[in-house]
Amino acid sequence: MSRPVGPVLRMSDDVDAIVAAIVDDNPGREVTVVDRGAYTRVSGNGELRVTRESIERHLGRDFEMRQLEGLMSAFAGRIDMTSEEVRWRLKSGEPGAPA
Amino acid sequence: MARMAREKWYDIARDLDWELSYVDYEEVFPEWMSGQGKVPREAWAGWDEPYKVTYPEYVATQREKETGAYSVKAVLQKSRIFDQLDEGWKSVAKEHFGAVALVEDLAAYAELRMARFGLSPAWRNMATFGALDETRHTQISLYFPHALVGKDPQYDWAHKAYHTNQWAVIAARATFDGMMMNPNVVDVAVQLPFTFETGFTNVQFVALAADALESGDINFANMISSIQTDEARHSQQGGPTLEILVEHDPRRAQWIIDKTFWVSARLFSVLTGPGMDYYTPLPMRRQSYREFMQEWIAGQFVDQLDDYGLKKPWYWDEFMAGLDTWHHSMHLGVWYWRPTVWWKPQGGVSPEERDWLHEKYPHWEEQFGPAWDVIIGNINDDRIELTLPETLPWLCNLCHLPIGTAGSPRNEKYPVRSYPLTYNGYTYHFCSRPCRQIWWEDRDTLYDPTVIERLLGGQIRPPTVEGILTWMGLTPEVRGEDAYGYRWARPYAPRRRPGDRPGRAETETRDRGEQAAQTPGPAGQGQPVPVNAVFEDDFVTQLVVVRDTDTVDQAARKVAAQVVGRRVPLRDAGLVVRHDGQVVRGDATVAESGISALDVVNVGWAGGHR
């Protein structure tokens, strides 16, 4: 993976559900998960996204996107955050951007 | 009640600004505080934070974080978990609390400066949240250790450290003042949120949490990783500021990052490196310091630099090489000068730990093994006094860390040496070329004398080791000692062959007691000449006070007395002194040979290297 981006999640009961939601929301993209105990690094090449809908489906309860902040100690890449979706990306990884 | 989605109203709310009519723009946003520089005023209107949060969201999320952190603490306080923590690990936490708690407070002021002088309302809005974050971090970083003060007075340094002149605190204060308080807010945004908070703090607050959890310190792991969730948000003030700066003044952007990255890397070599590679119990280490730095800095942070169109700093190769050496030198120094710190350094060089070090750092044995062998021999021969300092390392005028620790012994590319610079008739000493270069560029905004300069300037009285410790605020009950009472060194005792015994300096009897840091003696003994002395194969350069009437041979023995039999084994050979690159005659006096105060003096064995 040459341009890894994505969240670093701190230890909590919800980590597995968030990771599953990320995998669901990025079909066709390789997602790498590295578990270091106190933190779990989730990476995709160039871009990753996750939606509130998928998180709720995997958690089995309501979830507000702001709550992701309490679970995410860091992230690689740039972040875009709306009420429904979070994206991590590199600008230079966008289609049409210089390699 | 259905709420309007945040993105429908957020931009208007947080970009609310007004045209100034009663006062000039320059009065409200003076250049020296706001730091607009070459960026046109209208460019700041495009400042757009990527990590958006509203006040109601902020309050709700912070409440959840606080509830999580404090409830874990409340439960664990009733358990015996703390009493079972390893003494080495506890020192990681103690060092963290002392070095970090009040820096969080300083960061609140840095955020408030951006909240007032930031050049766009969106930025000022983010910075206001940042200031609230940093206030939380200060409170939690003081409250958690406070509960432990009754068990161990070293935890008191969580609050005390920055009220003292302890050497690491002086180094950290210089670094953080330069990052948060001295610069204008554009520079602050690139230095603090961008370079420091998206780069280095991740190593201390996220990576270190992995070691903390393994070591059983759930409370600490939970606290620091909770803090970092705030940082992940408010550090996003850096990106938009940098993006605008790169467009209009890329040279300035690159320079600010380069210098901040360097001083941060130097500081982390003492703040984080020894804790990860020596204090954390061996079975609990998730990765080495180098591996964590590779993951978070050489990988993640560098990708980010590239994404903003910036280059790796000019000294990149030197930084990467330093990941193999700097923190090993710092650990050796902190351990040797352990009474000067508020934690208990774990020697961390037992046979098993040494195997791990050798595996992770293939040159460790060659570069640092010999010094530890001398120390181990002294421990096992009950000569503890030879494992304790009688003078101080010479300190860098930029990073304030010991000179030599940006290199390592037996390292041709980055040797143990000073990089001096004489400016306006005064000689400054630096640990590395980058520190010297940064100092040169920023010299008009830097005035923090090193401990060595304060000592030589007469501020520390009496100028003895005891006087220095007292001046640094280190009361006897908190002075550091070996975390394990030297038990890590015991396994070497039966294995050692007689020939392995490290010897004493032949001159020791004569010169010990004549402490290097002492004041001028009675008249008639000549004038004191404090020099920055390095002995061949040692890891650090040191203050040694010779006299102008000493012969060069006598001066050489004074230097050797601080090193030989302490960190360098005795050899059956004479000593050779080099000054200004030339060998100096041993029977000449210091005055005749042109050695003056603050000069670099190299001492080595006659007959060449090894």
Image: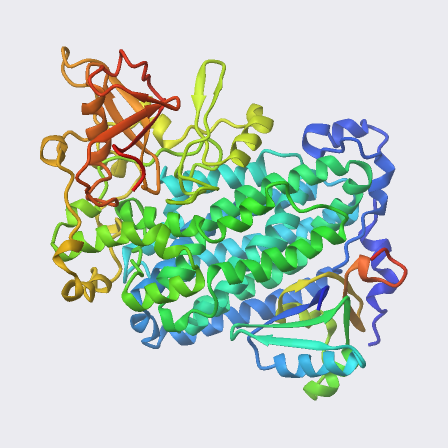
Q: Nearer the viewer, residue B416 or A15?
A: B416
* Residue B345 horizontal side relative to residue A72, left or right: left
* Residue B487 horizontal side relative to residue B260, left or right: left
A52 vs B324: above or below: below
Residue B563 can be seen, yes or no = yes
B255 vs B93: above or below: above
Report the quarter where the N terminus of chain B lies: bottom right
Give the quarter of the image for residue B537. Answer: top left
Q: Nearer the viewer, residue B88 or B288?
A: B288
State the residue lying farthest toward the front: B607
Residue that appears at 15% across and 29% down: B514
Residue that appears at 70% across and 49% down: B238
Report x, y in % for residue B555.
Answer: 22, 24
Residue that appears at 54% across and 29% down: B439
State the residue lying farthest toward the right: A96
Residue B462 can be seen, yes or no = no
Report x, y in % for residue B57.
Answer: 71, 65
Report x, y in % for residue B117.
Answer: 71, 38
Colour scheme in the image? rainbow
Give the quarter of the image for residue B530. Answer: top left
Report x, y in % for residue B355.
Answer: 35, 66
Q: Nearer the viewer, residue B180 or A67?
A: B180
Report the quarter where the C terminus of chain B lies: top left
Q: How many marks?
A: 0
* Residue B40 horizontal side relative to residue B524, left or right: right
